[in-house]
Image (spheres, rainbow, N blue to C red):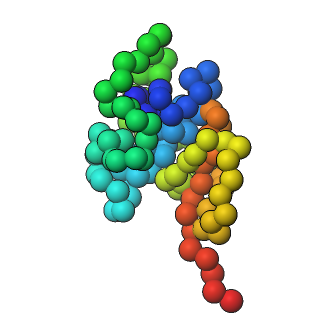
């Protein structure tokens, strides 16, 4: 819930769900820690203070959506993406395959380049 709150435009249910899906994709991957708190708490992976800053306003809907994510709900557009950054930014890396823009973020999979 905290990653969804601090990483997405909170007015977008789609963006919240997409961030939650990335968190769970990482939890389910052998390349990342195996718990939500460990994934979200990884150094420089999510918003600074994501585990400690105060959440303000009505968080009831975000809590419900976070519970749904923990129960298996996923954003289908995220696919297997384990990464995102603020939408509108571009990077020169050839292994970034974008799958979705939602909630102010661009979600992407890292793919190895094929040799010719």
Q: How many marks?
A: 0
Taking depth in this image into account, of 92 and 103 the one nearest to the observer is 92
Among the 4 quarters of the image, the one containing residue 9:
top right
Residue 98 drawn at (x, y percent): 66, 55
Query: In the image, 97: left or right of 33?
Result: right
Q: Quadrant of the N terminus?
A: top left
Taking depth in this image into account, of 98 and 13 the one nearest to the observer is 98
Residue 26 drawn at (x, y percent): 41, 52
Q: Which residue is located at x 31 percent, y 27 percent?
A: 52
Query: In the image, 7: left or right of 52?
Result: right
Taking depth in this image into account, of 71 and 34 the one nearest to the observer is 34
For residue 32, say whether it is visible: yes
Q: Which residue is located at x 63 percent, y 66 percent?
A: 93
For residue 71, say whether it is visible: no
Q: Quadrant of the C terminus?
A: bottom right
Farthest residue to the top: give it: 57
Q: Is residue 101 above or below residue 51?
A: below
Q: Is residue 69 above or below residue 94?
A: above
Q: Which residue is located at x 38 percent, y 32 percent?
A: 50
Farthest residue to the bottom: give it: 116
Residue 61 drawn at (x, y percent): 49, 17
């Amino acid at each position: 819930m905290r990653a969804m709150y601090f990483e997405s435009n909170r007015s977008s249910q789609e963006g919240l769900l997409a961030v939650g899906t990335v968190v769970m994709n990482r939890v389910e991957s052998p390349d990342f820690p195996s718990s939500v708190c460990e994934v979200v708490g990884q150094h420089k992976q999510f918003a600074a203070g994501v585990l400690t800053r105060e959440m303000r306003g009505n968080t009831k809907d975000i809590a419900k959506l976070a519970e749904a994510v923990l129960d298996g709900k996923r954003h289908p557009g995220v696919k297997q993406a384990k990464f995102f950054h603020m939408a509108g930014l571009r990077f020169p890396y050839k292994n970034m395959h974008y799958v979705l823009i939602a909630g102010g973020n661009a979600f992407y999979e890292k793919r190895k380049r094929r040799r010719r």
